[in-house]
Image: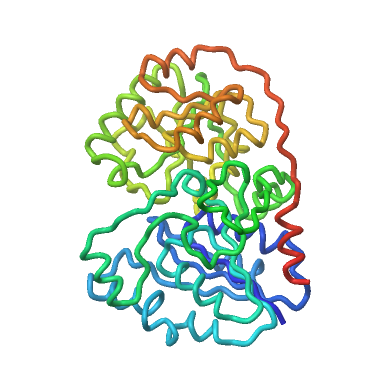
């Protein structure tokens, strides 16, 4: 008997895990387990996907816990008390082969799982691309001394950069050639399907779960803004809001603005901008990645600070313009990564408001999408279990 665990703590992780769990031929003697840690600001009912996994283990979010209870929970699920936790006891069961699929080795639970899996006989740890951070972040994050001291005391991991854990065996990424050599080392690197190009699977998912449809089109072209929680990570909340509002004010005159919020953004972040700005709403499944919902929205233009979701949509055959505007927010990140994207037709990195409006006035160029479903990742997972 074999097993595969999917360690997820964002909606994007969950969606990719649904894909791999149901799409890969794992063999009849493989137990598929979803480890779900809801670190998002929205509530996601994973029980509706019970048919996609053999077992679901849910770990409560730390978000609403007191400081003391938060430290106890972290110590239990990712620290010195791990062996006595639900995860620790489940992991102690004997299997012929054990595979861990994760998306970032820096989460305190996932990092513990990565280390624990490598103590098992016949195990393999795979990290799947979760976005831009997989490619551009290879500088060591240096947390405050108090954080490092506390983590050391409780046996917790201090965050560094995605791919830092030496126990990772394989990377699965969409662009293997762009993965920094500091992360590749002697690991296997497998090309990932753009799961959003698998239209048959996507359409089946939408038909089964997304019942609500919206007519987003009016008299103006639809401009989709893909939100990101920049405040607190890159700049102050007031500064982020000032720049974002100025962008929306310039765009509202000529475009119908739709916002796909990020699960990490404040629920009320866009409230003051209504009615000029509307939030993408598909009921309880509004958390589905925008790469999926875009096929129902059908925008003409996509603008985002630096979300990799925009490029994922581009690869599905999107023919409108895509504008990355992180420079407007004074953010300096992943210059090489975005410079490569800008070489593609209809993708632009804008540095100020004038350039934003100038680019929007350009004609759309015809594009040729070479992205196909190579299935290298599906074959890799299948072969692991043989």
Q: Position of residue 372 (x, y in %)?
A: 74, 40
* Left or right for 346, reference 208: left
**Residue 190 at x, y percent in the picture:** 67, 53
Report the residue at 62% width, 54% height from top: 172
Residue 267 on image: x %, y % = 34, 48
Looking at the image, which is closer to me, 139 or 29? 139
Quarter containing the C terminus:
bottom right
Which residue is drawn at the image coordinates 42% and 50% (left, top)? Answer: 263
Q: Quadrant of residue 52?
A: bottom right
What's the coloring here? rainbow
Image: 367 above or below 9: above
Q: Quadrant of residue 341?
A: top right
Going by the image, does 54 lie left or right of 321? right
Task: Give coordinates of residue 161: x percent, y percent.
Answer: 42, 55
Please tell me which residue is depicted at 34% across the width and 32% down the height of the picture. Answer: 274
Q: Is residue 142 left or right of residue 1?
A: left
């Amino acid at each position: 008997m074999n097993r595969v665990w999917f360690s997820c703590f964002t909606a994007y992780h969950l969606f990719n895990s649904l894909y791999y769990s149901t799409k890969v031929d794992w063999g009849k003697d493989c137990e598929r387990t979803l480890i779900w840690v809801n670190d998002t600001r929205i509530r996601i009912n994973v029980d509706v996907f019970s048919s996609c996994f053999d077992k679901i283990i849910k770990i409560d979010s730390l978000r609403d816990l007191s400081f003391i209870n938060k430290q106890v929970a972290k110590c239990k699920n990712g620290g010195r008390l791990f062996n006595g936790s639900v995860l620790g006891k489940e992991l102690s069961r004997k299997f012929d082969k054990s595979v861990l699929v994760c998306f970032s080795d820096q989460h305190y639970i996932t990092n513990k799982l990565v280390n624990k899996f490598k103590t098992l006989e016949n195990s393999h740890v795979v990290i799947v691309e979760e976005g831009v951070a997989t490619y551009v972040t290879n500088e060591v994050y240096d947390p405050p001394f108090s954080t490092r001291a506390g983590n050391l005391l409780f046996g917790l991991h201090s965050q560094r950069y995605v791919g830092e854990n030496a126990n990772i065996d394989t990377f699965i990424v969409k662009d293997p050639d762009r993965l920094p050599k500091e992360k590749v080392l002697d690991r296997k690197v497998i090309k990932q399907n753009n799961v959003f190009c698998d239209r048959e699977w996507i359409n089946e998912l939408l038909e089964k779960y997304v019942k609500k449809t919206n007519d987003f089109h009016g008299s103006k072209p639809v401009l989709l803004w893909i939100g990101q929680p920049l405040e607190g990570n890159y700049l102050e909340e007031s500064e982020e809001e000032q720049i974002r509002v100025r962008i929306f004010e310039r765009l509202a005159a000529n475009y119908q603005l739709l916002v796909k919020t990020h699960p990490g953004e404040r629920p009320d972040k866009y409230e003051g901008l209504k009615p000029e700005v509307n939030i993408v709403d598909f009921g309880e499944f509004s958390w589905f990645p925008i790469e999926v919902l875009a096929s129902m929205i059908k925008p003409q233009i996509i603008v985002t600070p630096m979300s990799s979701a925009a490029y994922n949509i581009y690869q599905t055959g999107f023919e409108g313009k895509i504008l990355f505007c992180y420079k407007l927010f004074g953010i300096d990140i992943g210059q090489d990564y975005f410079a490569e994207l800008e070489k593609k037709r209809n993708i632009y990195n804008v540095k100020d408001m004038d350039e934003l409006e100038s680019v929007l006035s350009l004609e759309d160029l015809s594009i040729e999408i070479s992205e196909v479903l190579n299935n290298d990742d599906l074959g890799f997972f299948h072969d692991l279990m043989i």
